[in-house]
Image (cartoon, rainbow, N blue to C red):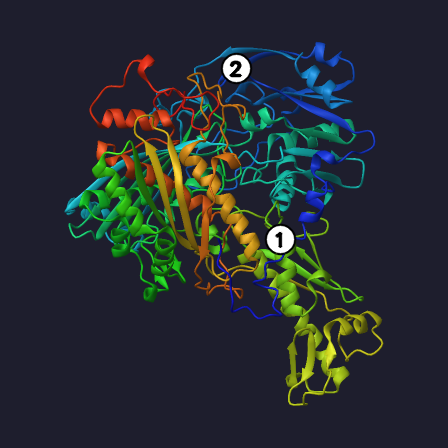
Amino acid sequence: MTAVDETRAPSAEVGRDRRRKEDQHLITGRSRFTDNIVLPGMLHVAMVRRPYAHARITGIDASAAQESPGVVAVLTGDDVKDQQGSLPNAWPVTPEQKAPPHPAIAVDRVAFSGEVVAAVVARTAAAARDAAELVDVDYEELDPVVDLKAAAADEKLAHPDLGTNRSALWVFDSAEAGTGGDVEEAIRDAEVLVEREFRQQRLIPAFMEPRSVVVDPTGEQFTMWSATQVPHILRLMLALTLAVPESKIRVIAPDVGGGFGGKLQVTPEEVITFLVARRTGKPCKWTETRSESLLSGHHGRDQWQKLTLAARRDGTVTGLKVELTANMGAYLGLVTSGIPILGAFMFNAIYKFPSYRFECQNVFTNLTWTDAYRGAGRPEATFAIERMMDELATELGRDPIEVREQNWIKHEEFPFTTVAGLEYDSGNYEAATARAKELFGYDELRAEQARRRESGDRVQLGIGVSTFTEMCGLAPSRVLGSLSYGAGGWEHASVRMLPSGKVEVITGSSAHGQGHETAWSQIVADQLGVPFEDVEVLHGDTQISHKGLDTYGSRSLVVGGQAVIKAAQKVIDKARPLAAHVLEANVDDLEFAEGRFTVRGAGEGQEGIGLTDLALAVFAAHDLPDGMEPSLDADATYDPVNFSYPHGTHLCAMEVDTETGQSRMRAYVCVDDVGNVVNPLIVDGQVHGGLVQGIAQALWEEAVYDDQGTLVTGSFVDYTLPTSADTISYVTDRTVTPSTTNDLGAKGVGEAGTIASTPAVVNAVLDAVRQFGVTDIRMPMTPERVWRAIQEGRGSAPTPEAAQPHFEAGEPNQDTPETEGGQA
């Protein structure tokens, strides 16, 4: 169910439920993914990956592989150690940040299971894979650092030469920043003090299309096709890492089958494929297997979170202290170190905390490195604060929505500067919550919950609440600079008026499933008054879109879309003098609407002149005003003045079988405010997909390692993604408070569902079983974990194995034995 905007003008494209332009070729098999690319004489690359989490390489014998049929070359770390450089980290969060070199191919030591130790190049992919099995590597095993808390205590070292596992300590204190009071004073004077520790488990992006790279060295430039979210950033980083002139590298992101942050990276395999192509002088391709993707593509989340919330007895919050330990894994990837820092500004969420302190200790372990995953720091923060608000409500014996409403920013208080120093420009948390409660039947479900509790029903009902906001549209550049980020937050766009009247839009935002071609066409159609079908959107090729900062952090529409608007407005401004010349009117007397210039006050009968007619006139250039160049094309680079702040209220009802721990979703309602909507269909798709990912973290997904650092959830048999059979029909709706920081009035939507849904589900399950003394259940909340929590809460020891409930192997809710720190 979705709201319909009845106020949209009939002729407007923005706000219209347009079917995506991209879908036609995607669903008819005419997509061109990187692995579909075949070039003459192309060679294939297979990676040799180490089986140990921590080991010293004592010898490599590649002779059998080199003699294998079809093999052209075998490269080891020794072969490329002087050329491969170190993979980049663009976000040194503190000047004192410690980090080991990050080689594409390990030279003398491996630091996580799955790290590349050699690359085999052969005439076919099968021959390369077969020969990779023949590379004989001798290792001296070292003690792996697996447990996050033990790593933070430096009990063992993931990188002995570094001398510590502690990479960086980042601190924000509202008293020191001048944005609030002293949190220690608030804690000392608290009438109610809530202290909790939460575990954010490790997740795997699990995008649909595995990563793939093709490099062609045979032209004047090296051309790389890659399944990447960041072609422009990748081009720059390849140039800097490999000391190749940037002008000699062209990066193309063709159709990209999802990313979720997992393709926001400069990968070892991209560097290796580039080096192999340069060495052989032939086009080379590498495409990962799903097992490689789960094992060695970067992971997400993985934190211990300790929170202390101070409040008065009447429920007013007075302070919040956050202490994080964040798992970097073995290395720092492109933005690894900054991901938990993004959450620093969101733990206070929509609440008026007068004092706040955030500390994050980044820690190395011998596991796959972590980096961006849908939401990137914001889901972790939202989970923690929404859990804490429920804990506060429980402590006070009050309704969780009532406590939230008492503390959130009221709609009349916007714009509002938070204790973390951000200015929220607009919002209406009351409206979103009221609508969500109405659609959910909140009071009726609370009454049913009470009846079930009174009757001692075996299946108990829990109701979970999540009221969230997020900072997205990662920018402005000055703010990113203050956080030591290595790039800006601007975006670039060009609008080309073709002589035939058609329009080409070139955007620096690189889509991987978001629907940019459709949304950008709608925006330009409205701006220029041309048909939707006459707009062509080009992206993802650094030779066509020469400038851009790509797609991540829900920035495409509010930054990239605004750049398109700025470029379109420049087109109109450039056309205005020509229109005045043709119409023999003063420039100041012209009006532009629905694609035509008319003279103000000239009466209804005037025809004026169309923008598309002017495009042809400029092409001919027979009669232009003096000094006008024969072009209407325009560029724009837009750097926003603020983030955008979507928000919403998510309500979840979960039924929990108290005898087996099995949980079932009864209802889910979300009412999001993403500002003005360009395409409701696309927004609905983003919200629904985000919901499933966030719910999956709560109930099913976890990357689990054994005590030797081996990934034991290395296939979709064990890493349990939800299917359509595991989901229900969600009720979605929207309220609208337009953003004041962009012409569209839009806010980001790509991550909202993921950010809000996890705590809503967890709070619901806990609400169902709190009566048994349960205060927390680790995610994912599998039947076994729920069942054990109920037994422990009741004060009874778990029953012998034979008496325990039966959990079917392979179910999404299957549990895994754990050690401290979340590893199996």
Q: Tell me the crowding category of disc 2: few under 14, some 14 to 19, or many 20 or more residues within 10 angstroms, Cα based.
A: some
- Amino acid type for the residue under numbered disc 2: Arg
Question: Which SS class for mark 1?
Answer: helix
Instruction: State which quadrant residue 104 falls in.
Output: top right
In the picture, measured across the screen, residue 98 lies left or right of residue 585, that is: left
Position in image of residue 66 (x %, y %): 74, 14
Question: Which SS class for mark 2?
Answer: strand
Residue ID at (24%, 25%):
792
Residue ID at (64%, 55%):
518
Is residue 556 at least partly visible in the picture? no
Is residue 723 at least partly visible in the picture? yes
> Residue 703, relative to residue 380: is it above or below?
above
- Amino acid type for the residue under numbered disc 1: His
Residue ID at (44%, 16%):
708
Dot 1 or dot 2: first in sequence order is 2
In the picture, measured across the screen, residue 576 lies left or right of residue 144, that is: right
In the picture, measured across the screen, residue 440 lies left or right of residue 618, that is: left
Of 80 and 696, the residue lying toward us? 696
- Identify the disc placed on residue 568: none
Classify the position of the C terminus by image quarter: top left
Position in image of residue 585 (x %, y %): 71, 87
Of 463 and 113, the residue lying toward us? 463
Position in image of residue 157 (x %, y %): 41, 21
Give the residue number, with chain letter if any, for mark 1. 516
Between circles 1 and 2, the one closer to the viewer is 1
Give the residue number, with chain letter if any, for mark 2. 56
In the picture, measured across the screen, residue 190 lies left or right of residue 18, that is: left
